[in-house]
Image (cartoon, rainbow, N blue to C red):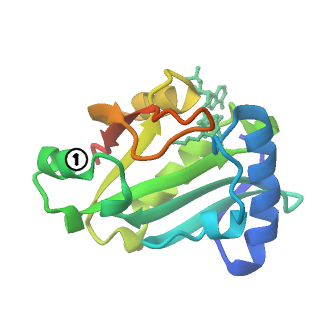
């Protein structure tokens, strides 16, 4: 892995995070619809904490966020599978890595930081992901995340259709 710093995100980073998100959206259509207000999309209600990955020249190459568990799709089934109440879950979201920085473990390093964070306060980590068999699904399964359920998302894509979303629990 090239020199990489994982740092807690601060408001001063947000413009650079938006630039990184723009590159990801242009390459991968993530998010499927470009938000009217990207900074608001990056600071949703229920956000608990967020981190960025910085290359040695200060470029933001990755991002991840921790949110309250009820923000995750299929939260009821996730909480039941984990044997906790909804407040016993924390969601991992807004994970992305810029195209040129991929395949070097940046996403895995961001997820490791989320797993180790005190902001987690013992909550079980969960996430939802579009069930397209793509890189994100491969990443989570390679890191041992366990699929709990799949079903239509609560939101619609640009075609007006609800994509299938898969929900996962972190084993650790
Ligand atoms: C999903 C995503 C975050 C993965 O980021 P990443 O930093 O490339 O992830 P990693 O480097 O940890 O793993 C990617 C691949 O590189 C491989 N890899 C990781 N470190 C490596 C290394 N040092 N040497 C060689 N290969 C390596 C991994 O095995 C993996 O291979 P695979 O796809 O065949 O399983 C990125 O593709 C992305 O931003 N996608 C668009 C946004 C998105 O879908 N986000 C998820 C929302 S739920």
Instruction: Report whether residue 159 is seen.
Output: yes
Quarter containing the N terminus: top right
Picture quarter containing residue 36? Answer: bottom right
Residue 78: percent from the left, percent from the top? Answer: 22, 47
Question: How many neighbours does mark 1 have within 10 angstroms: few (below 14), some (14-19), or many (20 or more)?
Answer: many
**Residue closest to the far front:** 160
The residue pinned by badge 1 equals: 78
Q: Which residue is at the front of the view, 127 or 131? A: 131
Q: Is residue 147 left or right of residue 85?
A: right
- Residue at 48% across, 51% down: 112
Residue drawn at 30 percent across, 62 percent down:
70
Looking at this rendering, what residue extends furthest in the bottom direction? Answer: 11
Image position of 55 with respect to 159: above or below: below
Where in the figure is residue 63, as x and y percent of width and height? 64, 56
Q: Residue 81, percent across and down?
A: 14, 44
In this view, the residue in front, 43 or 50, is: 43
| Secondary structure of the residue carrying numbered label 1 | helix
Residue 130 appears left or right of 62: left
């Amino acid at each position: 892995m090239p020199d990489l710093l994982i740092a807690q995100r601060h408001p001063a980073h947000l413009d650079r995070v938006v630039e990184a998100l723009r590159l990801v959206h242009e390459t991968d259509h993530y998010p499927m619809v470009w938000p009217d207000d990207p900074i608001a999309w990056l600071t949703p209600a229920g956000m608990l904490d967020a981190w960025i990955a910085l290359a040695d020249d200060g470029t933001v190459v990755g991002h991840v966020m921790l949110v309250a568990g009820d923000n995750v799709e299929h939260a009821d089934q996730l909480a039941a599978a984990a044997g906790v109440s909804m407040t016993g879950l924390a969601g991992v979201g807004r994970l992305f890595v810029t195209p040129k920085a991929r395949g070097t473990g940046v996403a895995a390093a961001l997820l490791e930081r989320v797993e180790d964070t005190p902001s987690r306060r013992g909550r079980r980590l969960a996430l939802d992901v579009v069930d397209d068999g793509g890189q994100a699904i491969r990443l989570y399964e390679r890191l041992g995340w366990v699929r709990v359920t799949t079903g239509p998302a609560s939101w619609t894509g640009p075609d007006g259709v609800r994509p299938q979303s898969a929900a996962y629990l972190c084993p650790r």
